[in-house]
Image: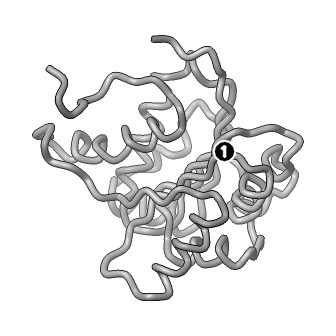
Amino acid sequence: MQSKIKHKIVIAVTGASGAIYAKVLLQKLQLLNNQIQEVGIIMSDNAKEVWKFEIGNKEYEKWPFSLYNKNDFSAPFASGSAKFDTMIICPCSMGTLARIAAGISNDLTTRAADVILKERRKLIVVTRETPLSIIHINNMKTVTEAGGIICPASPSFYSRPNDFDALASTVVDRVLDLAGLELPTYRWGEK
């Protein structure tokens, strides 16, 4: 079934380990372009370093989406009037989560998250940390109570993924479901 809504999505990539999740997310968003009006990407400096270390390239510079500087407060999604309906932070570091939970908008990622929450739109936070301290858990609780969705980067195995990208897809597909996008994916109980 084709979604009639054209989504405006902000993707933030932080310096948490798990650049593969961001890579697979961006690949899938390219394939779902008929459901998307606009995608804006923010990457922290650490995110770029982690991407280069874990994936071994600078492919993040080549996506057909707008890439915004981490301090570019003139980006459209720094204001609620631009009507971006979804923000996905993938992966999300515990430091970024803490700043969002505390309402500290010190860069474009945290400002955009603040805007999404205040406008009662969809914030999906793909946390990537283990183990968790009580501080992390309380920050997740605070963001959840503010309307955000915590979607830990906990892959599933029942679809029998055969490589790292397929394993990352088990998380990314859940994120895209949460964002309201229609995609073909493994569904439990379906043949």
Residue ID at (50%, 64%): 92
Nearer to me, 165 or 159: 159
> What residue is pinned by disc 1?
67
164 is higher (above) or lower (below) than 19: above
Q: Quadrant of residue 183?
A: top left
Nearer to me, 73 or 155: 155
- Residue 101: percent from left, percent from top: 65, 74
80 sits to left or right of 58:
right
**Colour scheme of the rendered structure:** one colour
**Image quadrant containing the C terminus:** top left
Nearer to me, 93 or 156: 156
- Residue 53: percent from left, percent from top: 36, 63
**Image quadrant containing the N terminus:** top left
Residue ID at (29%, 47%): 168
- Residue 32: percent from left, percent from top: 49, 23
Mark 1 falls on what kind of element?
Answer: strand
83 sits to left or right of 49:
right
Residue ID at (66%, 70%): 100
- For the residue carrying disc 1, how many other residues have a C-alpha within 10 Å: few (<14), some (14-19), or many (20+)? some
Instruction: Tell me the amino acid under the disc marked 1.
Output: Leu
- Residue 107: percent from left, percent from top: 74, 67
